[in-house]
Image: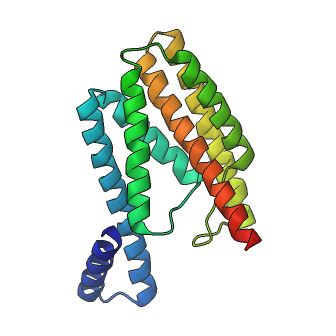
Amino acid sequence: MILKLSEKAASVLAEKNSLDPDDTALMQYGLFIILSHILYAIICIICSAVFGVITQGVIFYLAFSFLRSYAGGYHASTEARCIAFSSAAILVCVYCMSLCERFDLRIPFAVSAAAASIALLVFAPVDCREKPLSQKEKREYRKKSIALWLVYIIAVAVSAALSHCKIAYALSAAIILSGVMVTLGYIKNKKFIKK
């Protein structure tokens, strides 16, 4: 769906601007990324509105998107699976944040965020076979993902200390989902290497 739309848009733009094939492919990839982010942002906002946690949903989505761009992680084998998996992951995270409005989930969130932090520190960045990272890129992405993680951890601690639990839960959810994604990506890569 998104791939076909980005291919069509890139093709139209390439014809109008007389682009060579390399530029067209780059434009298609860029459009695919932008359209994917728009789709997932809309899904997150809708889920957040349904569960009454719009502020947390926006913070979560932005934080997760930034961290995911450097930490990497699991990539589904098809676009349909990607959309289904990503939508389900967003739904679960938003639902868990909504539960925090009714129940005190500081301990479960803290334990989950700690476990996810270990996964991020051990595995990140996790590339995929479709877009492997060079050793230099891995070092750069690792530094950036750890720096972002550290900023989030400090923000969680400060938010919790100041009783701004909504922010703490949203950033914790971003860390947790990122930790799950890098772990799944690492496992998938190991299985691929064994084949």
In depth, the one of 145 and 87 nearer the eye is 87
Residue 86: give x, y in percent of width and height: 42, 52
Percent x, y of residue 27: 38, 75
Question: In the image, is residue 161 above or below residue 33?
Answer: above
Residue 126 in sight here? no
Q: 6 or 139: which is nearer to us?
A: 6
Does residue 100 appear in the picture of this structure?
Answer: yes
Rendered location of residue 36, percent (x, y): 36, 59
Q: In which quadrant of the rendered image does the N terminus lie?
A: bottom left
Badge count: 0
Q: Is residue 51 left or right of residue 176?
A: left
Q: Quadrant of residue 44?
A: top left
**For residue 65, above or below residue 99:** below
Q: Residue at x 49, y 33 (%)?
A: 173
Residue depicted at x 62% and y 50%: 182
Q: Quadrant of residue 121?
A: top right
Image height check: is 8 above or below 39?
below
Q: State how the image is colored.
A: rainbow
Could you tell me which quadrant the C terminus lies in?
Answer: bottom right
| Image: 17 above or below 162 | below
The x and y percentages for residue 117 are 66, 35
Name the residue nearer the viewer: 30 or 122. 122
Q: Quadrant of residue 47?
A: top left
